[in-house]
Image (tube, grey):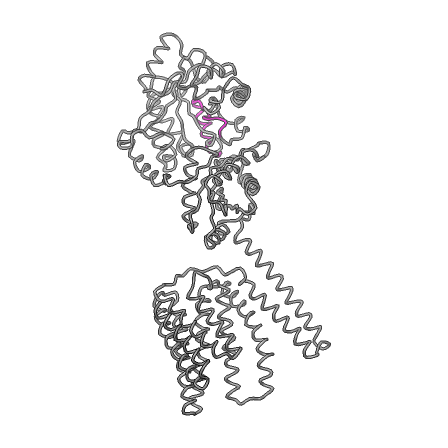
Amino acid sequence: MVSIVALSLLTAAGQGYMAVHSDARLWVLGGLLLVLDVAGAGYGFLASRQSPFTRMPWRLMAAGRAASAVGAITIILSERVGGAAFWWSGTTGHLAMYVLLAGGVLYGAIRQYTGRDRVALLAELTTVVAAGVMLTWYITVVPLLGRQPPARDLAYILGSHVGDLLLLAAIASMLLRGAVTRYALPITVNAVGLAAYLASDLAWSLSGVVAASLLLTLAPMISVGKPAHAARLNPPAWAVYLPVSAIFLACGLLIAVVALEGEVLRWGGIVAGLIMMAAAMAVRQIIYMRVSGDLIVSDPLTGLANRVGLEHRTARAVRHRESMALLLIDLDGFKLINDAYGHAAGDTVLIHFAGELRDAVRAGDLAARIGGDEFAVLLPGVTDAGRARAVAERILAVAAAHPVAIGDDLVPVRASIGVAVATDGEALQEVTRRADVAMYHSKRAGSHGCVVHDPSLTDPRADDALLSDDLDHALDRGELHVLYQPIVTLADARPVAAEALLRWQHPTRGRIPPDRFIPIAERSGAIARIGLWVLAEAAAQPFPASVNISPRQLREPTVVHDILAVLHRTGRDPRDLILEITESAIVDGEAVIDALRSLRTHGIRIAIDDFGTGYSSLQYLTRLPVDILKIDRSFVAELNGTPGGAAVTEAIIHLAGALTLTTVAEGIETAAQAAELQSLGCDKGQGYLYAEPLPAADVARTFVGSAAEGRTGNVGGSA
């Protein structure tokens, strides 16, 4: 920093001295340029050591400054002692400076591209330089040739203009590839220095040349100690129109020349046709650039912004220090929709939700699709978590109120939303991470809800990984055990079967809820081994058992063989076994359905657990090997003696009756619920009203007592 200030002050002092003492102008000018060139060469070579990505560009530019220093020395000697050799040496050094400066910049720009991208950049640079050639030819070269100056002057002037065109190409390359941004200060200073040198050259301003040389020296000085990276920067929005602007400039020059030379009749038609062609191509290029830009930042399926568009908008908000909040949205059960109805239906759901999302946010908010079924909403200007939550709840309400029609079915769209409010200047990655943690908690809390991130929230995924490792060994360590909840007839509480419920007593964490570790077991694959163990435990009991089987188990090619092997090993009658599956399992493909059919042919009964909470189409029930529908506890909890509270439960019971299926209600906690279920036509159920999950021995005694009283029955048949 001290060197930068000192050099700037020295340059300013020299400029001031030249303004006052015109007689010493040439010597002070030469001395200043010499000092700046030497410093620029030295720091350029130092900057080249900072990073392999910028080594060659800085070295070429340093060589250019060294050539300029040699040129300055020899020109001073030429003025001092005379001699054509000194003059030509100085001129050659000066012209070499142009080539080396431009060569360093162009090398750094072109090396970042390959194939078509490199050709496209060269074509754009050619367009810009061609406009400069036209201007130079008409304004400078033609008048110069008309005067027939001495060969020495002609060579110097033409060489300088060729150098100016090279500088123009270098400046254009930095603009077109996006190197000139606030994130690349040394490159920006270098670009401004080249532009100042070009302008000073054209205007024959010696003071401007000194200022330009200062900037070209400051650029490597700033770069020293700040290593460059290999990241390609995005060009400013206006820079991509630079080649088009050059075309229109050239067209304007053609019109001016034809008019000024009085050759309208002779050349007017040709020029007009050429201008029309160039204008048409320029318009086509503008349209192409806009379409290409839209493709880069937009999602082609939904028309929302994509991840790139979200990053661009968020980066702009951070750059302008705007406050903002971010919502991350994940559709619940989207895979089930794809499996049940096909991927075309899944696309329909995505398009439908995108439209609802667009309508639910403000005009200035940005809605984006950032993954398969993942969406995001950026809320600029929002600093209050309450306002962000209100937007999330509005999105959930709109989605819930507008199910999507797929064939004859109305499929509800449910989502989990994580909300994070950005702190001042916080990067997108950190905001996204916090919103993602909140969304994960939302999904674990249940479908169709939102969670706002606060510092107390932790990312449970790392803890899930630890639990997964522990779960791999839990069975061998005897940490897992099975409890059984009786399934009874509602009329007299007679036990007819018992549902096997897996429990995990962790040695250090204590009791871990099933809804915590079962999904982990599903993801890790441990559920296959654990599931067969639970089945074997249940089959060994002296009462009919209902066992949950996961979708992942059903996808195993040996599932039928494995289940039958367990029954054979334990000597259990297949008719005493009920397999409970979720709706997600029955829409998981024909292989699963075939496995269920095979199991049913051996006498095993099939129950659909939590019926009504998933996305399965009702048409599946007409062709599936199903015996029992289990009414989810959430519907039982709504029973309050009113038609509204009983609507869903009554519909399920009527549907089961029409398909000759048995219904079992889950989560019965009050006598009023049991009585209302009976009145609706459901005669079997389970819940804390009758018994909590119990050890096998306690449940066995219940069955023994009922048998002594002659009250045992069959869960799949009539009471």
Residue visible at 60% across and 82% down in the picture: 142
Above or below, comparing residue 42 to residue 280 in the picture: below
**Residue 99 picture location, percent across and down:** 46, 76
Q: Is residue 197 visible?
A: yes
Residue 249, position in %: x, y?
A: 61, 70
Is 684 magenta? The answer is no
Residue 174 percent across, percent down from the top left: 48, 66
Residue placed at 27% from the left, 29% from the top?
A: 478
Residue situated in front as seen by the camera: 176 or 409: 176
The residue sitting at the right extreme is 265
Which range is magenta? 588-613
Q: Where's residue 295, x and y in %?
A: 54, 53
The quadrant holding residue 241 is bottom right
Q: How many marks?
A: 0
User: Toward the viewer: 386 or 326?
Assistant: 386
Residue closest to the eye, 651 or 228: 228
Is residue 194 shown above or below 675?
A: below
Asked if residue 344 shows in the view, the reply is no
- Does 599 lie within the magenta span? yes
As displayed, is residue 501 above or below residue 193? above
Residue at x 57%, y 77% (from the top left corner): 136
Furthest-top residue in this view = 709
Q: Quadrant of the N terminus?
A: bottom left
Q: Residue furthest front?
A: 20
> Is 693 above or below relative to 514?
above
- In the foreground, 203 or 278: 203
